Image: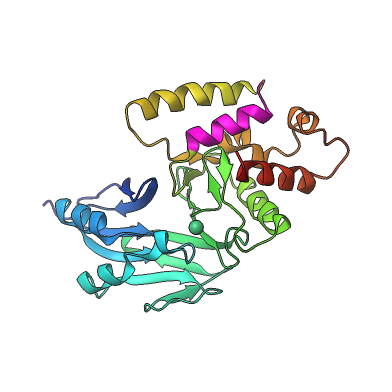
């Protein structure tokens, strides 16, 4: 290898279980994984790409996001695990929450930790700004392509506020979600907002991509703001469809979240 050769940061999805994505970030030598629910496909990728595991970022305590951590730490004992400070974990980790920073010097990246209560109470996201404006957001089970996570522990008000925080990030931010739910979410969104042209276009594009069995993700804050009903509680079309006029956006949000549970 040429000395001083720069490797571009690459971010690849690793499929796990039925519809999870474990995001793997690497610079050609070292890797970070986010929410490794299963160690087997992660180890395969690390070996195949000849990478060492540097760090693990955890967004929340659900098993499909942490199930692979122990095995990965056995294979790479030097790897540092970051996990929400408001949740309990049996594995060795550094507890983080807002406004902590996670410095990944190997990758020249600094992640801000964002508290996102709702799906779980301790849920966090990792957000890094980049010089080219294509900031990175690893948001676990809070924001999905055209959807959002279920409320297992938090209240609708908490989830609404958490999603508002993400919606306020710069529009070019690249959003790395952890489940392939996009197509189903788009169908639900279209039932609420059938005349949203951006949503109609997203359906066509996503059908094409999924037809080729490729991931519908990553997304962007701009795309989610244009198409994700849970970020569009203000939409007159959504409000009139739900017969919710002159109510606050939180009521619109909680009504949609409840409807989605039975969709
Ligand atoms: Zn979860």
Question: How far across and how far down the image is residue 119, in percent?
Answer: 58, 58
| Left or right relative to 151: residue 217 | left
Residue at point 55% right, 32% down?
186
Seen in the picture, residue 78 relative to 139 is either above or below; the reply is below
| Left or right relative to 30: residue 165 | right
Question: How far across and how far down the image is residue 257, in percent?
Answer: 66, 46
Asked whether the viewer can see residue 171, the reply is yes
Q: Quadrant of residue 210?
A: top left
Q: Point out the stretch of residues depicted in magenta.
A: 182-194
Residue at point 37% right, 37% down?
215
Question: How far across and how far down the image is residue 208, in percent?
Answer: 40, 23
Name the residue nearer the viewer: 36 or 261: 261
Can you say which quadrant of the picture contains the C terminus?
top right
Task: Residue 191: say if magenta.
Answer: yes
Seen in the picture, residue 187 relative to 38 is either above or below; the reply is above
Question: How far across and how far down the image is residue 244, in percent?
Answer: 83, 36
Q: Main secondary structure of the magenta part?
A: helix
Name the residue nearer the viewer: 169 or 2: 169
Asked whether the viewer can see residue 11, the reply is no
Q: How many marks?
A: 0
Residue at point 62% right, 64% down?
153
Residue at point 42% right, 70% down?
82
Seen in the picture, residue 51 relative to 168 is either above or below; the reply is below
Task: Residue 158: say if magenta.
Answer: no
Residue most extreme to the left: 1
């Amino acid at each position: 290898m040429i000395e001083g050769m720069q490797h571009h940061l690459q971010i690849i999805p690793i499929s796990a279980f039925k519809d999870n994505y474990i995001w793997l970030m690497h610079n050609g030598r070292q890797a970070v994984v986010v929410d490794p629910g299963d160690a087997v496909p992660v180890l395969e990728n690390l070996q195949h790409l000849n990478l060492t595991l540097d760090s693990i970022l955890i967004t929340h305590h659900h098993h499909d996001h942490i199930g692979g951590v122990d095995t990965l730490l056995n294979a790479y004992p030097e790897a540092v695990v970051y996990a929400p400070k408001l949740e309990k974990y049996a594995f060795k980790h550094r507890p983080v929450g807002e406004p902590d920073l996670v410095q990944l010097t190997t990758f020249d990246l600094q992640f801000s930790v964002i508290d996102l209560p709702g799906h779980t109470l301790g849920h966090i996201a990792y957000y890094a700004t980049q010089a080219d404006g294509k900031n990175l957001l690893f948001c676990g089970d809070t924001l999905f392509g055209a959807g959002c996570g279920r409320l297992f522990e938090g209240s609708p008000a908490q989830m609404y506020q958490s999603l508002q925080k993400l919606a306020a990030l710069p529009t070019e931010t690249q959003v790395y979600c952890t489940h392939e739910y996009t197509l189903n979410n788009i169908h639900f969104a279209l039932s609420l907002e059938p005349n949203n042209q951006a949503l109609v276009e997203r359906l066509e594009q996503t059908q094409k991509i999924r037809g080729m069995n490729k991931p519908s993700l990553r997304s962007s804050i701009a795309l989610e703001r244009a198409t994700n009903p849970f970020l569009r509680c203000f939409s007159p079309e959504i409000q009139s469809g739900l017969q919710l006029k002159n109510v606050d956006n939180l009521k619109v949000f909680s009504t949609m979240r409840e409807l989605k549970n039975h969709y």
